[in-house]
Image (cartoon, rainbow, N blue to C red):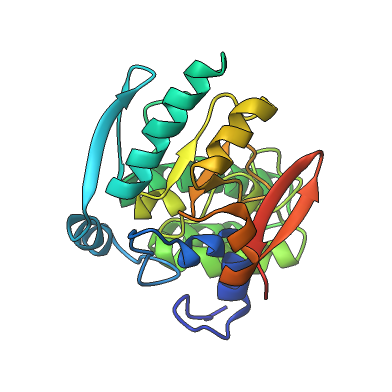
Amino acid sequence: MSASLQNDESPVVRLLLREYGAVFVAANGVVPPPVMVFSSEDEVASFQNSLSRKTAEIGGHPLTLQRAAMDDLLFAVEAATLAGASITPRGADSAGRSYSDTVALWHSRVEPALQHWVDQGRLDRRKADEIRRLSPFEQVPEVFELERQGIFFAKDLSKSIIYSVAPPGASQHLSLLAFDMKEFDDPTSRSIMNRHGWFQTVVSDLPHFTYLGAREDQLHGLGLRRADKDGRAFWIPEL
């Protein structure tokens, strides 16, 4: 499969836009990513270095986000404390990430899956080796093509890899506009995040919040629609 990840008409890009595209309407002075998928460490570093950033320690971890996103996250943390709740990161990589971070997560799913499907006789060993030799950027459409054939790459091997990790270069964490919250099951913490411009936007990733920098009643006007699942509201692109 030779679909270009920078081709807006490709099925791969449309899939990624549906899953992760809410970040492109982020407001309140933050800068959305310039591309759907970053292709390299240099491209990510160049973008991140152009941003107004802020680092703060939350839950014992130093985290970096775009300045407005971090300011509102800190306001949310304070509001949660006053309400007897809490907002803390799931780990050290809960906010900004590098391209290499996303590559490592991608490989942690792709390599075991390749070996599994070769062992099961569903994937030719030569084809698996060809995929291994590709750059992470080039692997994405190949993996999605195999998943169209029922050869899945999520951690449990029963569904698409996008329900497990974002493809390298597609993660909202690269734009310093995402935060993984430990208390994602607490409706009070979720509500406080929403009041400070942070919303759940990836239906397959419950701890994940995206900084949209807007009130909830403004999100429809930004081109998002509400999708309710399991008692939670997700804001996803209206395609």
Image position of 187 with respect to 128: above or below: above
Left or right, 239 with respect to 138, comes to: right
Q: Residue at x 56, y 33 (%)?
A: 192
Residue 141 pos. (x, y %):
55, 69
Q: Quadrant of the C terminus?
A: bottom right
Q: Residue at x 45, y 61 (%)?
A: 26
Q: Nearer the viewer, residue 182 or 83?
A: 83
Q: Nearer the viewer, residue 3 or 111?
A: 3
Image position of 171 with respect to 222: above or below: above
Q: Residue at x 49, y 66 (%)?
A: 25
Residue 14 pos. (x, y %):
61, 74
Q: Quadrant of residue 101?
A: top left
Q: Quadrant of the N terminus?
A: bottom right
- Is residue 90 among what the camera can see? no
Left or right, 77 with respect to 45, comes to: right
Residue located farthest toward the top when viewing the structure as drawn: 84
- Is residue 187 among what the camera can see? yes
Residue located farthest toward the right when viewing the structure as drawn: 230
